[in-house]
Amino acid sequence: MNWLRYHIYPQNGELPVNWRKVFERNAKIRVEIGFGNGEFLVHMAKRSPEVNFVGFELSITSFVKAQKKFHKEGIGNVRLVMVDGRFGIRELFEDESVEHVYVNFPCPWSKKGQEKKRVTYGDFTKSLAAVLEMGGIFELMTDDENYANEVFLNFKESGFFEVEPIMVDHKRGVQTRYEKKWLSMGRHTFLIRTKKIKKADVERIAWGGKEVHQRIGDFNEEKLFPLIGKVFKEKNKVFVVKEVFSSKDGERYLVKIISSDDNFEQHYNILVEKRRDFWIVKLDSTCQPYRTPAVKWSVRKIAEEISLT
Ligand SMILES: C[S@@+](CC[C@H](N)C(=O)[O-])C[C@H]1O[C@@H](n2cnc3c(N)ncnc32)[C@H](O)[C@@H]1O
């Protein structure tokens, strides 16, 4: 079987993900954010074959290494999504549908001004309090004591979780790559374990209709090319036009976009294509983004900017 089969692309389908269909069975779901080389997922998936495991990562190298490991070990109960875990937790699961979420040795981003990069930043605690089952567990292990204390307080003060005292140098039957690295340097590990006791409501920004297209009567490419480099901003949505390519016959244009909803950045292309007596402006199917407000707005806005009618 293909070792790339673990990687799935939820942006191509409806949200939240129908995990029962993805795994072809109904089972409890556990999630690891930032799985790195996959040691923890391999261990957990083998130990609990009755559970479905979902991993979130941003690094392509980690995707390759982890998938090779799963394939070699013959693991069938893991699927991986290349997405920011903060977005993934909030947008890919129904309320109260996840049993356990793990984060192992996230980068603490401890310098001033870097807080927004932390995996626990923003509405993460609330998202967990929405998607975890009542009594569901969130665990985070780190080598950074200050960060551990901060996460501990954050969860305690949220009112949604019961937080156990921080466990120092706790052993779990598996050591991740970073755990080994820090322990070999004589550092300590700190484990925060919290149990959901109250449900939160969070707004999902990428749920709802997938279709995003605009029809325009006519357009002139002279209105399209000057958009290169232009930044469009509205509330917490922003997008920039990076490049524009045209086909030789002038009947198809590809507009490269980078958009962001709060801190969630996506790269994709908008297609402007001639039909019999009108033009269509839509997302190009080659690299599908999640249909967030910024993505939908970028298609509408480009159509508006280039339309002659
Ligand atoms: C320090 S490494 C730890 C890897 C692994 N958990 C371990 O313990 O060996 C942190 C990992 O988290 C990933 N990461 C960072 N921010 C992330 C995010 N917002 N969503 C998903 N993965 C993230 C990074 O790509 C990196 O592989």
Image (cartoon, rainbow, N blue to C red):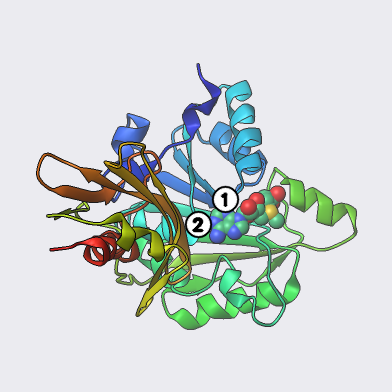
Give the image location of residue 82, x and y in percent. 50, 46
Other residues around mark 1 within 10 Å, as few (<14) / some (14–19) / many (≥20): some
Residue type marked 2: Asp
Q: Quadrant of residue 294?
A: bottom left
Give the image location of residue 160, x and y in percent. 41, 74
Q: Nearer the viewer, residue 89 or 190?
A: 89
Label 2 vs label 1: CA separation? 6 Å
* Residue beneath the point at 84% across and 55% down: 183
Q: Nearer the viewer, residue 241 or 56?
A: 241
Residue type marked 1: Leu
Q: Which residue is mark 1?
A: 58
* Residue beneath the point at 60% across and 42% down: 60
Q: Is mark 1 within 8 Å of ligand 1?
A: yes
When the figure is inspected, residue 28 is found, relative to residue 49, above or below; the finding is: below
Q: Is mark 2 within 8 Å of ligand 1?
A: yes
Q: Are marks 2 and 1 in contact (CB under 8 Å)?
A: yes
* Residue beneath the point at 17% across and 63% down: 308
Q: Which residue is mark 2?
A: 84
Q: Secondary structure beneath disc 2?
A: loop
Q: Residue furthest left?
A: 277
Give the image location of residue 295, x and y in percent. 33, 60
